[in-house]
Amino acid sequence: MLIEQEEDEEGGFAVSGRLFGVLILGIALVFIGIAVLAVASAVFGGSGSSGVVIFIGPIPIVFGSGPGAGWLILIGIILAVLSVVFFLAMRRRFDLF
């Protein structure tokens, strides 16, 4: 069963103000985190490590650099898998109604 959504007068789907606020908050937190890391790196110097996990569909692309990149990549993969599992669990939960 799919959840029915109501269309608004312009032909799109109505989005909750709370949902939109959470979306904007998430985007703002990402940019704030990038700014804090850039400033901390410039002020304190030193070497840094980075690890990235990008999902294109079900295929993960993983890369990193620096002395601690292996751990960062491992943590990134674990978080990515947990987010997919959480998404599927929530989708299954809402499909039951």
Image (tube, rainbow, N blue to C red):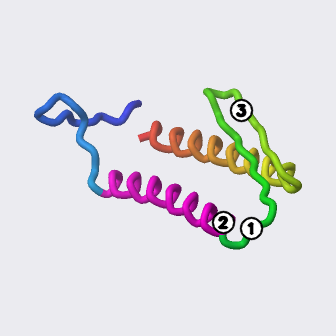
- Is residue 26 depicted above or below 86 in this figure? below
Secondary structure beneath dot 1 equals: loop
Tell me if mark 3 has few (under 14), some (14-19) or many (20+) residues whose alpha carbon lies within 10 angstroms of its own. Answer: some
Q: Amino acid at mark 3?
A: Pro
Task: Give the Cα distance between marks 1 and 2.
Answer: 5 Å
Residue occupying the far bottom of the picture: 44
- Choose between 5 and 61: the one closer to the eye: 61
Q: Residue at x 55, y 61 (%)?
A: 35
Q: Which residue is mark 2?
A: 42
- Choose between 21 and 84: the one closer to the eye: 21
Secondary structure beneath dot 3 equals: strand
Secondary structure beneath dot 2 equals: helix
Q: Which mark is residue 89?
A: none
- 6 sits left or right of 35 in the view: left
- Is residue 93 depicted above or below 21 in this figure? above
- 88 sits left or right of 23 in the view: right
Q: Which mark is residue 60?
A: 3
Q: Which quadrant holds the C terminus?
A: top left
- 41 sits left or right of 49 in the view: left
Q: Which residues are magenta?
A: 18-42
Q: Which quadrant holds the N terminus?
A: top left
Task: Give the Cα distance between marks 1 and 3.
Answer: 31 Å
Q: Position of residue 58 (x, y in %)?
A: 66, 28
Closer to the eye: label 2 or 3: 2
Tell me if mark 2 has few (under 14), some (14-19) or many (20+) residues whose alpha carbon lies within 10 angstroms of its own. Answer: few
Q: Amino acid at mark 1?
A: Gly
- 68 sits left or right of 83 in the view: right
Q: Which residue is mark 1?
A: 45
Q: Residue at x 70, y 27 (%)?
A: 59
